[in-house]
Amino acid sequence: MAGAGSKGKWEASSVTNNTILELKSAGYLLANVAHRAPKAGQVVPTPWQGERVVFLPHFIRGLGFPLHPFIRGLMFFYGLDFHDLAPNSFLHISAFIIICEVFLRIRPHFGLWLKIFNVKPKIVDGQQADCGGAMVSKLPRVEWPEGTFIKTVKVWQKE
């Protein structure tokens, strides 16, 4: 699972304003989305009111703005923020939305979500992880399309 190599702690970010501009030019982030990079060497983020901490690997795995209403509802239900989810969790969520909308031709349905996936806290050294503290995983014995997931993204908390 993504983040498996990490200890669930915040790490100093490697992201700069140029990194964010590259993300925008690649089409992962809309040009009109406000952003700011962390201060150099900053370990624990200090978002201002109305801001959220987001990681580059989240965008590469399907997170986009404006948020899909299903993602907003899912995060509200579980009491999550973006930094709580490791990158592959967004891959699961994005795949679920695509399967519902494109193949089943329905709106993503939370009841169906609960039959396929679960969200569990990630425990590190007896405590819930500060960063990447929740994991989305497929329930056992559930038929779901196979995907290509990166087994570990050891530096995702720096991005």
Image: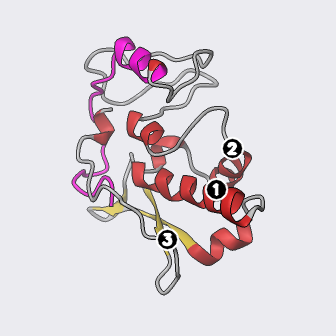
Q: Main secondary structure of the magenta part?
A: loop
Q: Which of marks 2 and 1 is nearer the N terminus?
A: 2
> Residue 141 shows which numbered tag?
none
In the rendered image, residue 144, in percent from the top left (x then y), is placed at 52, 74
Report the coloring of the rendering. Answer: secondary structure
The answer to whether 12 appears left or right of 37 in the picture is: left
> How far apart in space, not on screen, are marks 1 and 3 (Cα)?
13 Å
> How far apart in space, not on screen, are marks 2 and 1 (Cα)?
9 Å
Name the residue tied to disc 2.
68
Does 5 lie within the magenta span?
yes
For the magenta stretch, what is the residue range?
Answer: 1-24
Quadrant containing the C terminus is: top left
Q: Is 133 placed above or below 49 here?
A: below
* Mark 1 neighbour class, 10 Å CA radius: few under 14, some 14 to 19, many 20 or more: many
Residue at the far right in the pictured view: 106
Q: Residue at x 73, y 72 (%)?
A: 111
| Amino acid type for the residue under numbered disc 3 | Pro
In the rendered image, residue 15, in percent from the top left (x then y), is placed at 33, 22
Name the residue tied to disc 1.
97
Q: Is 131 placed above or below 108 here?
A: above
Viewer-proximal residue among 106 and 156: 106
Viewer-proximal residue among 11 and 116: 116
| Amino acid type for the residue under numbered disc 2 | His
Name the residue tied to disc 3.
145
> How far apart in space, not on screen, are marks 3 and 2 (Cα)?
21 Å
Q: Which residue is drawn at 25% across and 52% down?
A: 7
Q: Which of marks 1 and 3 is nearer the N terminus?
A: 1
Q: Are marks 2 and 1 in contact (CB under 8 Å)?
A: yes
The answer to whether 107 appears left or right of 67 in the picture is: right
Does 116 lie within the magenta span?
no
| Amino acid type for the residue under numbered disc 1 | Ile
User: Considering the numbered disc 1 on the image, is that residue within a helix, a strand or a loop?
Assistant: helix
